Amino acid sequence: MTAPILAPTLAEPPDGILRRVSDHLYLNPPLLLGLLLVPPLLWIGIVYVGSLIALLIQSFYSVDEFSGMVKHEFTLATYAELLRPANIDIIVRSVLMAAAVTVAAALIAFPIAYYAARYATGAVKALYYVAVMMPLWSSYLVKIYAWKLILAKEGIITWLAGQTGLGPVLDFVLATPVIGGPSLSISFLGMFVVFVYVWLPYMILPVQAALERVPRSMIDASADLGAAPGPTFRHIVLPLAMPGIAAGSIFTFSLTLGDYIIPQIIGNSSFFIGQAVYAQQGTAGNIPLAAAFTVVPIVIMAAYLWGAKRLGAFDAI
Amino acid sequence: MPVAVRFTNVHRHFGAVRAVDGVTLDIAEGEFFAMLGPSGSGKTTCLRLIGGFEQPDQGGIEIFGRHAEGLPPYRRNVNTVFQDYALFPHMTVGENVAYGLMIRKLPRPERETRAREALALVKLNGFEGRYPRQLSGGQRQRVALARALVNEPRVLLLDEPLGALDLKLREEMQEELKSLQRKLGITFVFVTHDQGEALAMADRLAIFHSGRIVQIGAPVEVYERPRTRFVADFVGSANVLPPTYAGEAGAAAKWMSLRPEKIRATAPEQLAANDEASLIGTITNVHYQGALTRITVDGEGLTLRAAVPSDGRRFQTGQRIRLSWPASAMNSMDDDP
């Protein structure tokens, strides 16, 4: 026979300890999986779930009214306290705000995500990612204080409204009960605007990811079968985007529900859940009530996800 | 027979790319018409022009005498089987098939009956409740077919519908599609890059090359009498003889095609018949395919590929051999544009 065409340059490398380790791991996938999973499982199991359970237990303790000390006895007294009208007000206010922010974020995010998934390519797409993510690069506090200035009575929005003759419109909006106030920076409306701004990227990205997975041919097929753009959107695009919207809404909803900085800086002085937790565990020193307050978002999110599943939001996963 | 689809000098350009560059074409009603060509030849764009997913930059498209330019897909009585099937993943097979009827607001019982009938037509009885992800590739393809046919289109467009199937299933589906088309009498327009598929199924086929049609005709016509070197090579990999060859033989100096299976292989000393041309050469490649053996032979300034019956004969590279073929097997062609 003729000489081998390929020179023996691809000889086996020498047997090192690293090589033996990788051989062993390659041949034992469960071992590799175990090594990869144990550290994060310990982290989630002990640090995260453990402290959550500790929190849950705390919420079943109560504070002695006279001494102000935590009584380590199981009782539902703290939950009874949680359900006082003033606290119910805080919960309802927080949930309504979170719901409004989520709906607005979904409405604003959808066209942006749709454009990015369907039409943007190359440099435009890179620019889009930068534009969506950039707000996340700067400090949260700086952004909120910037918004405080923008929304203030002496701020650019009031000034712009005055310059363009829209001053009366702004005054009319601010005169609306509940959402209005002396200025945008001291109103639920202003708070809503800031919430939508800070959480919008968390809605855009999952919706875009969901839309990316809808091939062009599926939209073509719907049109081919007689559906005008409206029905195609209703029957095909929206259901397929739903898991993304659900994922995004989990972010916007729970982040709004738990935030205690924005209501403190932007709104009027009415409390939100996050602030209540902050005040109860800090100044008031009522750890059990603070714990009970944090249980509220957990219960609401669980109910929300259950409802979303019942409505078929995750059918297209 | 009335014309189902008519293209009059249709152009569709994408930037500098002339995807469809002046196509004129008539597809008769009830015809099984194949558009054959390599990728990027414009065949799929032509199909999308009929479907309404693309609009022509220039020229006219008529579907059953009605001008189709500017009509969106949902205003055309034309349905498509997409290459990736494009089944809706969040709907059951039954809902997928009934989608077009649901859009047209047919009452639910009628929708369900007709979807069941369409599924029976493609032999998927009882699959209504499954989801597309639970089906095999061949079954998905049938669902896509049923979903298109349930709308009773006058023209059915098929975009490489068999491309994703394995060989055996593909051959099965070829026959099934063909008999389905005969049974329903609907005009089928079929896009493929597989010449065997086009030859086997089509009543007529159009060969696309660089956005133009280079030849239209019945499979036998196109196969036996390719008009250009491109067609000769693309459909059935014919040998192409240069103009000098015909010139030396005293004929008009034109390119000629010669099908590999028209060539006989004999021992060099065995002479060719009177009405035959022949050459002696050396075998440079042997490709055994069971019933046939494909050999490549270099000799007398030509390289010829022949497909000869194996018949227990052994061919070896380096072997001297005589190739001969009837003079009538040579087909003179036009120059490529």
Image (cartoon, coloured by chain):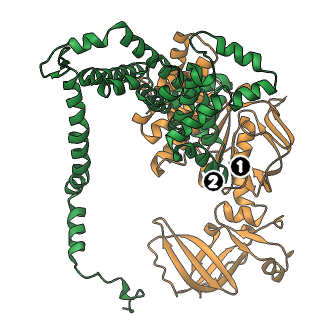
Chain colours: A green, B orange
Give the farthest residue toward the front: A66
Which x, y percent locates residue B257?
73, 69
Tell me if mark 2 has few (under 14), some (14-19) or many (20+) residues whose alpha carbon lies within 10 angstroms of its own.
many
Q: Residue flagged by tag 2: what amino acid is it?
A: His
User: Mark 1 packing: few (<14 Cα in 10 Å), some, or many (20+)?
Assistant: many
Q: Is residue B334 visible?
A: yes
Element assignment for label 2:
loop
Which badge, 2 or 1, comes first in the chain's sequence?
Answer: 1
Q: Chain of mark 2?
A: B
Residue B43 horizontal/vertical position (percent)? 71, 49
- Do residues under tags 2 and 1 come within 8 Å of each other at their CB atoms? yes
Quadrant of the image occupied by residue B276? bottom right
Is any atom of residue B131 visible in this view?
A: no
- The residue under label 1 is B43
Q: Mark 1: which secondary structure?
A: helix
Q: Chain of mark 1?
A: B
What amino acid type should be assigned to the residue bearing mark 1?
A: Lys
Distance, label 2 to label 1, CA atoms, is 9 Å
Which residue corresponds to mark 2?
B193
Q: Is B124 displayed left or right of A266 in the figure?
A: left
Identified at 59% across, 49% down, the residue is: A130
The vertical placement of A198 against A271, above or below, is below
Q: Position of residue B106 (x, y in %)?
A: 60, 12
Q: Give the position of the C terminus of chain A as an image quadrant.
A: top left
Q: Residue at x 72, y 72 (%)?
A: B240
Viewer-nearest residue: B162 or A296? A296
